Image (spheres, helix red, strand yellow):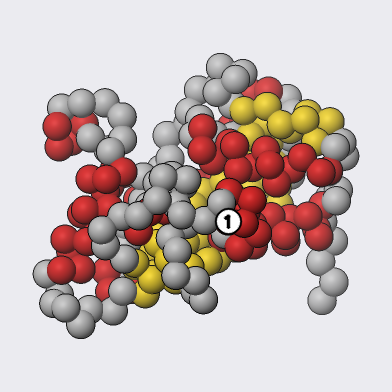
């Protein structure tokens, strides 16, 4: 069945995120298409509460909120790490595992703590535990009139410990993509952009809306 997508025309597009690393990656991917990305943070838009239980639900929630508030098309990314031996966790709660407030009484996120939590749960299962994992990215592109498009991407790999590299963000220092020996945090950004879960989702978006 032929799927027809609404086309995105050159001009301003809100990146519905306050995550600087994520915004930086998305800007680099959009640059060749005549799009002028502006982040929700730059516009002072509030962060909606992510009440969804799937990447798709949260991506749509964020995209619709920014498109409505800015009266511009908006692109939201909801992504996370799914670990096979942990039944797909942390999944949609990937960022929540890094929240310091619950553990230290401090605001913000501690990604080393989050990586350590994953590793601790794997270690409990013994030295032969399955270390396979994947990063999942769901992109939601929404317009002010309520129309939306969804694109999903994946990057398969395995987890390593201890963390290695300083080029990425989030769980990148413990994730080794399939067919590689370096973690996402050791791979130069331009090279990572070509093989990441976000790149996979973007390739589908590009073929659909440009």
Assess disc 1: are there few (<14), some (14-19) or many (≥20) residues with their C-alpha within 10 Å of its C-alpha: many
Please tell me whether mark 1 sits on a helix, a strand or a loop. helix
The spot of residue 202 in percent (x, y) is: 69, 55
Q: Is residue 192 visible?
A: yes
Look at mark 1 in the image and give the residue it sits on: 192
Residue visible at 46% across and 54% down? 186
Question: Along the line of sight, which residue is nearer the eye, 196 or 72?
Answer: 196
Residue that sits furthest to the bottom in the current view: 128
Q: Please tell me whether residue 168 is drawn above or below residue 135 in the rendered image.
A: above
Residue visible at 26% across and 26% down? 107
Residue visible at 16% across and 61% down? 120
Q: Is residue 151 visible?
A: no
Question: Along the line of sight, which residue is nearer the eye, 88 or 36?
Answer: 36
The spot of residue 23 in percent (x, y) is: 58, 36
Q: Please tell me whether residue 202 is drawn above or below residue 82 in the rendered image.
A: above
Question: Along the line of sight, which residue is nearer the eye, 86 or 31?
Answer: 31
Q: How many marks?
A: 1
Q: Quadrant of the N terminus?
A: bottom right
Q: Is residue 136 left or right of residue 33?
A: left
The spot of residue 62 in percent (x, y) is: 55, 38
Residue that sits furthest to the top in the current view: 44
Q: Is residue 120 left or right of residue 208?
A: left
Residue visible at 48% across and 68% down? 177
Question: Along the line of sight, which residue is nearer the eye, 12 or 192?
Answer: 192
The spot of residue 209 in percent (x, y) is: 82, 52
């Amino acid at each position: 069945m032929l799927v027809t997508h609404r086309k995105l025309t050159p001009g301003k597009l809100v990146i519905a995120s306050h995550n600087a690393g994520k915004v930086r990656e998305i800007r680099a991917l959009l640059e060749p298409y005549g799009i002028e990305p502006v982040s929700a943070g730059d516009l002072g838009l509030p962060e909606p509460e992510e009440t969804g239980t799937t990447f798709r639900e949260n991506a749509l929630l964020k995209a619709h909120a920014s498109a409505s508030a800015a009266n511009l098309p908006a692109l939201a990314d909801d992504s996370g790490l799914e670990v096979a031996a942990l039944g797909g966790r942390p999944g949609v709660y990937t960022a929540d595992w890094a929240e310091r407030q619950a553990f230290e009484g401090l605001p913000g996120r501690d990604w080393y703590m989050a990586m350590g939590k994953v590793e601790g749960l794997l270690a409990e299962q013994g030295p032969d535990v399955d270390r396979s994992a994947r990063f999942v990215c769901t992109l939601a592109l929404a317009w002010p009139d309520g129309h939306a498009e969804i694109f999903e991407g994946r990057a398969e790999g395995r987890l390593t410990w201890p963390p290695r590299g300083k080029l990425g963000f989030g769980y990148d220092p413990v994730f080794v993509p399939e067919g590689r020996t370096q973690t996402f945090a050791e791979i130069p950004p331009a090279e990572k952009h070509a093989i990441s879960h976000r790149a996979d989702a973007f390739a589908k978006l590009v073929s659909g809306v440009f």
